[in-house]
Image (cartoon, rainbow, N blue to C red):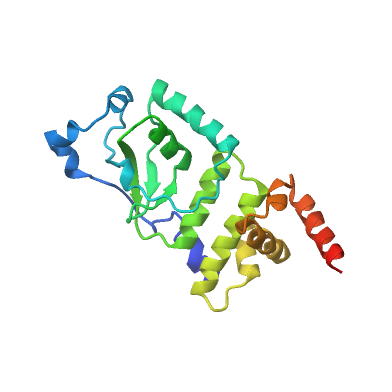
Amino acid sequence: RRIRRAFSDRWLQGQPAFRVNPNPRWHTASNVCRLSLSTLMIARLQNIGYTPISSIIVGERLRRRDAKFQAAVEEKMKSLEEFGPFQPLLVDEENNLIDGGTRLEAYKQLGEIDVPVVVAVGIDAATKMVMEMDANEKRSALSWQEKAVGIYKIHTAEEAKYADWGTRATGSLFGISHASVAQALIFAKLLIRHDKELWECPTAMAGRDLLLKRQESAV
């Protein structure tokens, strides 16, 4: 019941509610004059608020900023130049980015000043992480390492709120066993510390083999 209350009832079912950032500053001529040439070239979303790109706060993201990420950014840049934006960025009430890291970086590299934004109201840390993971999975599958880090962040956020939260509760959120959650937590603690060998493992099974070898060597 705790799980249903903590997630199902609030996960995009009326809580949190979404509202468009009205951003009334665009009503002044002085602000319109601040538009860059690239902004004028890229089509703008209608009936969506725009906010300064410099005001978007980007915390630690699940996606690694590697060659694959940059390739996705460059592809998004071409799309923005040719077709314009298809959807706004999703931020919380304090302008912390929830969804749209690749799009935001594309806007930056195109020299844009302002970006289309929708504000999610009443989102807690765990739900933000669930939303980020879900959005990323729909576009391009996260690596097993990125998933492990995401599971760890959600687990620790919920554990801090609920005294009786455990690996079984986290497992129920993702449809995986509590043993898989426990393994993800072990992986994540090493990945967060930038364990290069573990980041380079192609699969979770290879990661488990690596940790077993380390244990055997330590004996």
Which image quadrant: the C terminus? bottom right
12 is higher (above) or lower (below) than 76: below
Instruction: Classify residue 148 as left or right of residue 43.
Output: right
Q: Please name the residue shown 74% across and 47% down the image.
A: 201
159 versus 71 height, above or below: below
Above or below: residue 187 compared with residue 136:
below
Q: Position of residue 133 (x, y in %)?
A: 54, 50
Instruction: Answer with the quarter of the image where residue 142 lies.
Output: top right
User: How many numbered marks have been drawn onto this rendered protein structure?
Assistant: 0
Residue 46 visible at all: yes
**Residue 9 makes an appearance in the image:** no
Which residue is rendered at x = 38% and y = 31% of the image? 85
Residue found farthest to the front: 218
On the image, the x and y values in percent for residue 31 come to 17, 36
Q: Residue furthest left?
A: 29
Q: Position of residue 52 (x, y in %)?
A: 28, 42
Q: Is residue 153 left or right of residue 94?
A: right
Q: Residue furthest bottom?
A: 163
Q: In what quadrant of the picture does the N terminus appear?
A: bottom right
Which image quarter: residue 49?
Answer: top left
- Residue in the image at 71% along x and 61% along y: 180
Taking depth in this image into account, of 70 and 25 the one nearest to the observer is: 70
At horizontal 43% and vertical 55% (from top left) the residue drawn is 13
- Tell me where residue 178 sits by quadrant: bottom right
Q: Please give left or right for residue 172 compared with residue 204 in the image.
A: left
Provide residue 8's location: percent of width, then percent of height: 50, 61
Q: Foreground residue, 19 or 115? A: 115
Q: Nearer the viewer, residue 196 or 28?
A: 196
